Image (spheres, helix red, strand yellow):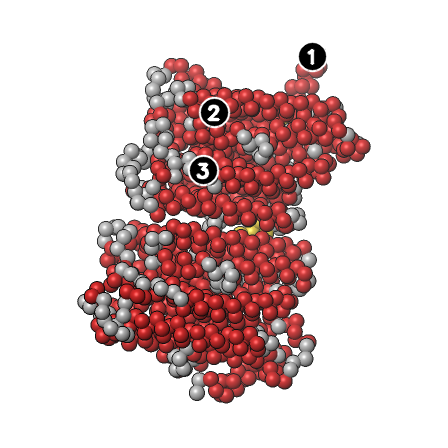
Amino acid sequence: MENLVQTAMQNVNFAAIMPSLVLSCFGMALLLLNAFVKRGTTTYASLISLAALGATAIVSYAGWNNPQFGFAGQVALDNYAVFFHFIFLLAAALTILMSDAYLKREGYPVGEYYTLILFSTVGAMLMASGTDLMTIFLGLEVMSVALYVLAGFFRGQLRSNEAGLKYFLLGAFSTGFLLYGIALIYGVTGTTNVADIGTYLAMNHQLLADPMCIGGMLLLATGFLFKIAVVPFHMWTPDVYEGAPTPITAFMSAGPKAAAFAAFMRVFLIGLGTLHSSWVGLLWVLAVLTMVVGNFIALRQTNLKRMLAYSSIAHAGYALVGLVASNAIGVSAVLFYMVAYTLMNLGAFAILVLAGKVGEDNLTLEGFSGFGYKRPVLAVLMCICLFSLMGIPPSAGFTGKFYIFAGALNAGYVWLAVLGVLNSAVSLYYYLRVMVYMYFRTPEEEFDWVQLKPGATMCAVISVVGVLLLGIVPSAVMALARQALF
Amino acid sequence: MSEHILSLMTFLPLLGMLIVLMLPRENGGLLKIATLVVTLITFIISLPLAFDPVFKTSAAMHYTEFVPWISVGDYFQMNYSIGIDGISLWLVMLTTFIMPITVLSTWNAVDKNVKGFMALMLLLETAMLGAFVSLDLFLFYIFWELMLIPMYFMIGIWGGANRIYAAIKFFIYTAVGSLLMLVAIIFLYYYAVQTGAVINGFSITDFYNLSLNPELQKWLFLAFAFSFAIKVPMFPVHTWLPDAHTEAPTAGSVILAAVMLKMGTYGYLRFAMPLFPDALQQFLPWLAALSVIGIIYGALVAMMQKDVKKLVAYSSVSHLGFVMLGLFALNSIGVSGAILQMVNHGISTGALFLIVGFLYERRHTRLISEFGGLSKQMPVFAVIFMIVTLSSIGLPALNGFVGEFMILLGAFESELRWFAVFATSGVILAAVYMLWMFQRVMFGKLDNPKNQNLKDLSVREVCVMLPLLLFIFWIGVYPNTFLEKMEPAVNQALNQITAEAQAAPCSDDSAHINCPQSGDSDAAGNYHEQDGSGYHH
């Protein structure tokens, strides 16, 4: 017995989970602190959270080019994980920046909100670090449970309740699929370690056509694709995105989505890489479907949060194109695209947070009539984010799409690239329409309720600067994404 | 300094935009003066290019700058690579020349949100100049797409009643084409990499040397040609143009007509044709047919317009058809004529849009039936309008004549002889619609009381028109200033395009034009022979 414990401890290597550990400690400390602080002030919590994210970033960076493995190969802090950690930390930081004033305006200045964001980030980080299906599952649950609460955080609002409940029920259902998939794969290969699954399948080719193996793969894919909101597992997205508090919507569309991508790619490229020919065709179809459905339904939306929800479905489709390509360019393109998407989407959401009235009933196309004349600076920031979402240069959205389609074309997926750009063309219309209302309509409102709250404004400015930098001098981040491949 | 002249010229307007954005928004006059100064300085910076004799003898790229830009290991590499030859030289000059004039024309026309308008004008200038000087396809694409943004807002914010529809249509039409081109560009790059060709980034000159099989060329050519055809615009993808032109504010229409449409024809000459010569040969009859349909269709529709601005817009479709026909003639005289006609169209149609703008500022209508007999009330205006009209029709001794004559001559001497026959009718139709419109607007009785108090052109307005008139006469009387500098570059481009056809025997009548194997100097010599034999005497 003692011997066993000793062997286990030798395998532990806390360095591999240090980022999650640090952030969890901060989260719990903050939770405790909340109990001692008078209700109604949350600024301290957002500052502590930002500090926590900064500290975690430093700890995580220690793993760059210095990979750490721990817990008998269940967790890895390799370049791939570190790159994704930075995406989650960026998304969380930007979300927290825009939250402070928002919570006060909506009447829920509660410190636990920040704790939950931190825990959700911990889960996301575990997913990216997980090299074992169990760790990935653990990360997914930590991340999701925190998100279920956050989506329903405005307990007095029906819409928010609906979002939380819907997300929870469907999320729990999809987690069931994932778990069942893990069980089947374990049944076939006798291991839950991603790398071992890969080796085992590579050595036992007769298993590749085994219905249990294929079934397990499909169920795993279902679980991940639900979190990424790929068609046909996207149904929850619009309602949840519309009902959840706006900063949480922004966070969900960037952080957790990237986390699901991180785990999905690791499992499917390493663990189920030998099954590539079985899943690549499926993903090809789903990528196209996702782009088409996301973009075409977005055309009809008048509520901006809902429109951005459908647009985020479409963007997941673009990112899938990189995974279908399955080559080094394509996969690193997905990593780069996640950074780009985080920046441009959170930038756009920050503007929505600033422009909203209490209750946010005015976040419609009509509600933005003449916004460009009354709030010129905010409108320009919004335009830059929208042009980036369209993929018009020079912006992160353009370089990201370029990278993705470069991967697809390098791998020979010409038609997928053509369908991708045609979908981009469709998306032009609904993004342009926002600008039509902002600039081409006469103002009906004075927009005098819009105040330049420092946090949200900073969030918008940081995002836009990032979008432009990644559009004009993307080399450095592209190179990092290249080095981050496993 | 002089080695960075192109960068300086390209990015100065961008710097100007930042300055304009910092000026107070209430002071419209200051904003306009600042913009005018920036565009004038840009013009002055670009002026030495036009006087550089190097273009007379050398077909190579000059004033080149090269800085590695994006480099991601073995994934891809893009460079900031710019330079001009005798072809892009005149389009660059046209751009820097037309911009101050356009700014000056907005003095009274734009009074709403001046700051935004001026900032967009300057951004647009950077994008247009950048597209003309780019020697890296990726860089070109960035500027090409960037151009859409300012024009979208110019049409949408300062445009006419139907501006939202026109702005979105303009944006989506152009973007759809360019997105397909983007796929083709990336595909071309990886094809080059995978076949082991030596390429430095997305360098066009390196791409010229690729040997692509005809089947591949066909698809890539279609992607490029479609994108540029929308921009030109060629029939049947021209439908965005009348809407955009009609709804755009005068300054927008002038830039759109004078410079942005040239982006499409330039794209054919610089990219689509030399990159995929085999595919070009294959599609040549179809493209020529579309050009001729554009010429005749544009002219016929122009004839029936009630709105002066729409008439000018459709006349652009017709004129650009001539330019395309000249390019497809694939001989020195046709292509030179086409490039000259690009400049001519920029000047004449730009001037026409300015004239329409003058009318609109005075009467707030553009319907032909609202006017009549203006020549009595506005004599100076009448003279200028007359000259511009005649230049657009192609009266000898004015610029339009030289370009159209060379294009038709080139087409007659090429395989497109029968297309040229039909195209010639476009010249006659142009005379019909322009003169008829002129007659209805300027002559007859001054019976509409609203027209009886119209003021003649102000000094500022005459100043706007004078530089254009200068070039209308200059190109008409002595086009050699322009032709001699584009000649080596045109011959080299033709070498590139017809390289495949080199081996084929040349028929006698086209021997001195169509056969590029005679080399640069020889071709240049032939050119002068043409020159002597008659078109400007």
In the rendered image, which residue does mark 1 sit on? A2
Picture quadrant of residue A38: top left
| Left/right of residue A3 with respect to residue B162 in the rendered view | right
Compared with A332, A37 (above or below) is above
Helix, strand or loop at mark 3: loop
- Which sits in the foreground, B245 or A291? B245
Inter-mark Cα distance, 2 to 1: 49 Å
Say few, some or many: other residues with alpha carbon within 10 Å of mark 1 (under 14 / 14 to 19 / 20 or more). Answer: few
Helix, strand or loop at mark 1: helix
Compared with A251, B340 (above or below) is below
Give x and y (percent) for residue B68.
53, 56
Query: Which label is found at residue A301?
Result: 3
Q: Amino acid at mark 1?
A: Glu
| Left/right of residue A304 with respect to residue B440 in the rendered view | right
Mark nearest the camera among 2 and 1 is: 2
In the rendered image, which residue does mark 2 sit on? A163
